[in-house]
Image (tube, coloured by chain):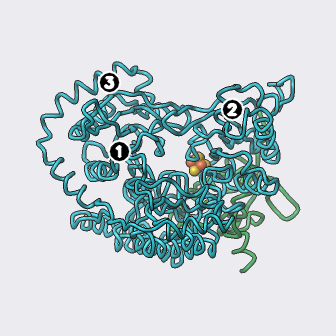
Chain colours: A cyan, B green
Amino acid sequence: MYDYTDFDEAFVRTRVAQFTDQVERRLDGSLTEDEFRPLRLMNGLYLQLHAYMLRVAIPYGTINPRQMRQLAYIADTWDKGYGHFTTRQNIQFNWPKLPDVPAILSALADVGMHAIQTSGNCVRNVTADHFAGAAADEIEDPRPYAELLRQWSTDHPEFQFLPRKFKIAITGSPNDRAVTAAHDIGLRMTRNAAQEAGFEVFVGGGLGRTPMIGHLVRQFLPIADLLPYVESVLSVYNTLGRRDNKYKARIKITVHETGRDEIARMIEDRFAEVRPLFGGADQALLADIRAAFAQPNLQSRSVADYDAAYQANPVFRAWADTNLSAHRQGDHAIVTISIKAHGQTPGDATSEQMRVIADLSETYGYSELRISHEQNVILPHVAKADLPAVHAALAKVGLATANVGLLSDMIACPGMDYCALATARSIPVAQEIALHFEALKLEHDIGALKIKISGCINACGHHHVGHIGILGLDRAGVENYQITLGGDATETAAIGEKTGPGFAYDEIVPAIERILRAYLGLRLHAEETFLDAYRRVGMDPFKRALYGDEGHQDAA
Amino acid sequence: MSRRYIPKVVTANRLREGDVVYLTADNHWTAHHHEAELIEDEAHAQLRLLHAAGQKLVVVGAYLADAKAGPNGPEPVHFREAFRTRGPSNYAHGKQVDLTNV
Ligand code: SF4
């Protein structure tokens, strides 16, 4: 995988030294909190409800075993023995103490990691398809482009003070697993008539207070034009973006207010100016980066042992059916390690689990790992022959839950158990839904389903694009949960529609059960997924299930 | 127009540890909500908040939170403040264990 260059290393070390000094000056009183806050945020350090929180970037979700072990070490040494993987492909530590943070950042720098640009109005951690470099349906590995964007945007002087934060997502395959439509810029790899690879470019997607699906502004962007085009988008946004109103500052509002056609035209005009300024250095750099992302040398292995285990062992079979995805080499598979054991906190891995994952990656996975925005960990390349051993090792540490893509494979943001911005809890709602349907043994019957939960309107839990979305709100001093249906995070992206009045904390699990029992009753056959059924029948049957025959909108 | 003032406590996080604390009547910071000073007067609340904001080497992010009198001292009104007295609901971490182990 890509290793940081000497330049990156020096840059990160300089930042650690700077921040170490800043922490000291905060602790001795030379800096006030008002002065210190922007500095700590630039280094990923937040003050949350019960403690500080450190957010560490995992660029495009790619991490190596040595880094994973270092995260485990940090969790044990300076935190409470676990870390939380987020929908931004970051990891968060929930309990660091301020005087320890310089040591943590230094430990991260030892393995080429950092917390830079995980906050602030800059280009954030570029996210990518978590099956990058392995998926059978992939046109090209998107990560070299993500890395190119990372290097270009890191400390880019023009784009450190954008009107608002800026998120770019990229996928190398037509099946969008990176939620590109919900990002400021979404890049989807495609081929033109001449079979050359390039990008479809979407601009102005985003969730949060005003959820919007990105608009297609360029059908086909040649690879060589990537940086000048992205720079043109940022440049137009930097000029037009609403700095007067935080809630209108994201590019989605700019696009909405300006109109897709006009924005596309402005971007093209700017592109015509910017393009000649790129003399080809970016393409030379890209070539170097590509070489660093060279594919591992996959061995050819017999799948006989895998087939035998699949036939003989129903537990293994259940796991293989849900947690494996098609690898481009038929005798290999992509393993999604579920960090969603029923009743556990979605996305939380203990230090012991991190170490086991690191070991498995080294022993069976060509030392590769990815973190998914769905808060799971991926072993992208495992020979099918090794899967029984991988499964057995995962089972020993509670990581063999066979639920990927099912109801309990939920996204849940930290919510009011940690987050200072939250309006309600999300983690216990996720825990209770998972346990409830596990007890009913309905999860496999229900089949493919994405439930996504956010603890406030900021939508870190992606609730708008959940098949079932749950948004926790504060209604007159009581937790209240609003449900949306029909959201979709893939290439057929859609924003979910509100069902009606929300539900109290102790009503939300029964409400979800009513929705899903209605679905089981009305689906045409077992293969018709919840989302397909919703698209066929619309909201009404679910409203009736939730609110009764009158559909009383004035309830609650 | 005049509405009864909702009593307040001054709360913040400790600068070094990040722990949730409350200002007592004798100018200490306590981890226990019920030991906080219950402030029933708006002008006094502003003074106490100013006092807290001046303690920049001890606490960070001081603010006034609604509270009410209870049998053992002030109690939180809003669920957010109730959670802050305990810690997260998914693990026995934070004050719910730290305080009982003291
Ligand atoms: S959605 Fe809201 S509560 Fe959840 S992590 Fe984001 S800001 Fe916090």
- Residue A131 visible in the displayed image: yes
Which residue is under mark 2? Answer: A533
Amino acid, disc 2: Ala
Which residue is under mark 1? Answer: A139
Residue in front for this viewpoint, A217 or B53: A217
If the image is split into quadrants, where does the N terminus of chain B sit? top right
**Disc 2 and disc 3: Cα gap in Å?**
35 Å
In terms of secondary structure, where does tag 3 sit?
Answer: helix
The percent position of residue A303, horizontal first and vertical second, equals 49, 65
Residue in front for this viewpoint, B56 or A26: A26
In terms of secondary structure, where does tag 2 sit?
Answer: helix
Amino acid, disc 1: Ile
Instruction: Say which chain tag 3 marks.
Output: A
Residue A201 relative to residue A445: left or right: left
- Residue A101 visible in the displayed image: no
Of labels 2 and 3, the one closer to you? 2
Instruction: Say which chain tag 1 marks.
Output: A
The percent position of residue A277, horizontal first and vertical second, equals 13, 37
